[in-house]
Image (cartoon, helix red, strand yellow):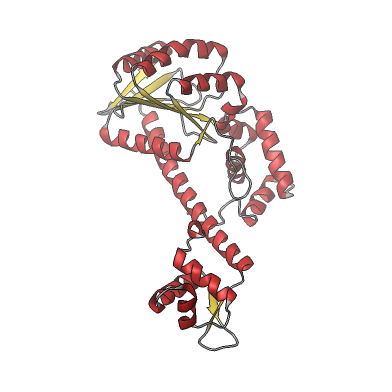
Amino acid sequence: MLAVLGLDTRAESVYRSMLAHPQAGVAALAQATGLAEEEVRDALDLLSELALVRPSAEQEGRLRAVSPDIGMEILLARQQAELAAQQQRVETSRAAAAQLIADFADLRPAEPSPGVEQVIGLDRIRECLARLTREMTTEVMTFAPDGAHTPESIAAARPLNEELLKRGIRMRTIYLDSARNSPHTVEYVNWLSERGAHIRTAPILPTRMIITDRSTAVIPVSSDDTAAGAVVLTGQGTLSALCALFETTWASAQPLGQPAVRDAEGLTGPEATTIRLLSEGFTDEAIAKRLGVSQRTARRIATDLMDRLGARSRFEAGVRAVQRGWLPSHPS
């Protein structure tokens, strides 16, 4: 029952027996649990490692079980620390991949490179995407950080996406969490899902990106003006990194049909992202852009978080967030 917290069945059985029989030694615990004495000793080693048993202050050489309220708090804290470390590793990988994207986006036509093609102007970008759409045979993976769809953009996209899905193309798209607040967008992605597309949302995305057949990626030269130009990437190493970025983001994203989840601290994805960006000194405008929401919404989220933390300034909010365990105290 406690395996999810790192406690296997034998260790849990020994821990329960120690709570029920505080004076029991290894032999008595083996008899009570039906385990061999060697198995009991192995369980005690694990319990000691997890800080669920401690040397007795009254009986030298004996171990005593930590009370369940303290013990479960220790296990939960340990798991939260492991989750935080994993999240930090994900964020580090995401940042490294985003930097790779930025490095390629900074290339100029005067600096040709194998596997890199610059496409300038909206007409040429559309022609490029139309060609890739005709040629793709297996799948398309998309980051869509532009926020909610308009009725016009939906009308334009429906026929193309319906044709792709009829051809058996596997379609996976990640939107920003803010898309959940748009009835037009929710209706459209539900329509896509009914036809076989897979849609998820994330609190933040590094850039707009389309990957076709894991062999070609298209990203904008500038995230501020996606119509100005794009970079078409076909290098094997680059595509491997971008596909890994997509898969990592996809794994942590939330299916649109499910309600937004909260983390161990009760924060939604946008809230957790906002408090991290606040601590890094981002303005309301910059946070709004990252979340795909209006400045007013970003300001409201930031204000709500500061109220919950009892902070009077953004600096104080960062300090209190670390104290509350909302942010790591020593980023790795």
The reply, left or right, for residue 60 in relation to residue 299 is left
The answer to whether residue 203 is visible is yes
Identify the residue shown where x is 39% and y is 29%: 105
Identify the residue shown where x is 42% and y is 25%: 221
Residue 280 percent location from the top left of the image:
58, 45
Give above or below for 245 relative to 5.
Answer: above
Residue 25 percent location from the top left of the image:
50, 83
The reply, left or right, for residue 177 in relation to residue 251 is right
Residue 40 percent location from the top left of the image:
43, 75
Identify the residue shown where x is 41% and y is 44%: 93
Which residue occupies the foreground of this view, 250 or 101? 250
Identify the residue shown where x is 38% and y is 77%: 38
Residue 198 percent location from the top left of the image:
44, 28
Which residue occupies the foreground of this view, 94 or 265? 265
The answer to whether residue 106 is visible is no
The reply, left or right, for residue 156 in relation to residue 259 is left
Give above or below for 134 relative to 65.
Answer: above
Which residue occupies the foreground of this view, 314 or 36? 36
- Disc tally is 0
Give above or below for 150 relative to 223.
Answer: above
Residue 75: quarter of image: bottom right
